[in-house]
Image (tube, rainbow, N blue to C red):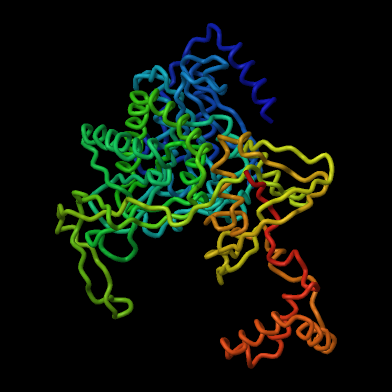
Amino acid sequence: MKKLLTLAITLLILSCGDTVDNPENKDFKTLFETSNGTQTPTYEEVISFYKELDEAYVSIKTYEVGTTDAGKPLTLITFNPNRTFDSEFSNNQEVRRILINNGIHPGESDGIDATMMLMRDLAMGVIEAPEKTWIGAIAVYNIGGALNRNSTSRTNQNGPSAYGFRGNARNYDLNRDFIKNDTKNSEAFTEIFHLVRPDVFIDNHVSNGADYQYTLTHLFTQHNKLSGVLGEFLHNDFQPALEKNLKEKDWDITPYVNVFNRTPEQGFSQFYDHPRYSTGYTALWNTIGLMVETHMLKPYKPRVEGTYELMKSAIEVTEQEGEKIKLLRKNAFNAFAKADTYPIAFSIDSTKTTTLDFLGYEGEMTPSEVTGKQRLRYNRDKPFNKEVTYYNHFKPTKEVTLPKAYVIPRGYRNIALKLRDNEIRFDQLKRDTTFMAEVYHIEDYKTSRNPYEGHYPHYGTSVKRSQEEVTVLKGGYIIPLEDNEEGLRYLLETLEPEANDSFFNWNYFDTILQQKEGFSPYVWEDKAAALLKENPELRASFESKKQEDPAFAQNWYSQLAWIHKQSPNYEKAHLRYPIFRMLR
């Protein structure tokens, strides 16, 4: 695909020559504009708009990348007035790159309309083109959901008149699929992301956790997790600059109001974006992530207009700070590669807070006409401006040491393919290889009782570590960390089983959780007795456990199973994590 795309880019650039922009003088008005902000176009109308814009303007190009679960490719649109091969997709350090994602939840269509107007206005010169900032956008990410059009599924939302559905063609919520990669949509996004290598990523959404005066809210990737000087820059420079830029255009904005069925003035925390989410995934490559969340109770017209202005502001800030962003991202890759440890879990640091000057509405508890119980109601006749405590600092709660390399047995080819799709470099062993490694045994884990996005994910995972001599057969995959500086965070977040969104926690290794061989009690009784007789220390441990655990003392099968697990008969594969860590 990438070779074909490169060829297409070259041919397009060669054909740019003396093209005259918009020879037919089309105005390219969108359906949003002609309907006075009440309608959003169908998927087909969106793609047709961009293809016509591509034909009319040299600075606009459209590319079809990969495929999706709906059977259609993702459409990537680029604005690049200085179109050369280097400035389009090669790793040109002079170009800052912004990637915009739209329609991940097609009912939240604000970004689809705003981006259509943004790209048109950039091409027409209505917006001054940035000198060193390249802009790309995915027209509609969830194509299957966009094709499933309706007017009722967004229960809380105030317009547009018709829109798409949240689930994709296989009913996945795509903003839970970035790290686990179950869908074709996610595979196509991965290809685009690594093709573009964005410095800044914007994902356009609509949300409602409470009622308040703002049309615009933002959800930046958590700055402590982004880490180091880059995280500090996001928190102390980029975010304030964006807010100031919008304020100067009379657009108030606040952090995403992370509450459910309670009032914001009680205080709320920053949403922590794990790698399952778009900005959590892009942060693994030290990309500054911004999720736009317009307020769904506001009319559609100002929501789209606010999204448009926010993206303009993000472009302006990126243009101003682009050189610094490039340098900080480069330094962040180096810092993670040189570190001895890596944090895989965070929690709120309640000793550090931010005070928001919050524009809200008074909340009242009144009797429900439906249930007769107390319900929350916001009174828009009582607006307020109050100081609200915002918990936006997190601290690491668990760290792992960095290995020299990860080694994956050949049987886990599915894992290797996901690594390859994320441009992780690895080699395959040319012969059976024995070496000392750190080995994990799964000590504890919990499993969700309810299905979640096609899985019953694990959580609360803990491991027991040991050093063992292991043999990996020919064809196994060896992944040196020194060869994967840019992908290091992705490797650690997926291959360390205790990480929140690890492949283990997403059920990729559930076969190791089930014993394949067992025992018949009438046979094992005699062997167990002989084993205890021959091993006084084992017998002492057995008797001690019976004294300390009354339930165990009353359960004859548990006692036989415990002895079996201490014996040579117990299979080595059970609870043994199959990915090994080669020591530094």
Residue in the image at 83% along x and 88% along y: 526
Q: For residue 509, which quarter of the picture?
A: bottom right
Q: For residue 491, which quarter of the picture?
A: top right
Give percent across and percent down for residue 160.
39, 47
Residue 129 appears left or right of 453:
left
Figure label count: 0
Residue 3 appears left or right of 321:
right
389 above or below 104?
below
Q: Is residue 149 visible?
A: no
Residue 396 appears left or right of 557:
left
User: Between residues 92 and 196, which one lies in front from this camera angle?
Assistant: 92
127 above or below 310?
above
Give percent across and percent down for residue 554.
64, 93
Give percent across and percent down for residue 545.
61, 84
223 above or below 311?
below
| Residue extending farthest bottom | 554
Q: Is residue 345 visible?
A: yes
User: Between residues 481 and 28, which one lies in front from this camera angle?
Assistant: 481
452 above or below 92?
below
> Where's the N terminus, which quadrant?
top right
Residue in the image at 34% along x and 35% along y: 233
Residue in the image at 54% along x and 33% along y: 47
User: Between residues 445 and 238, which one lies in front from this camera angle?
Assistant: 445
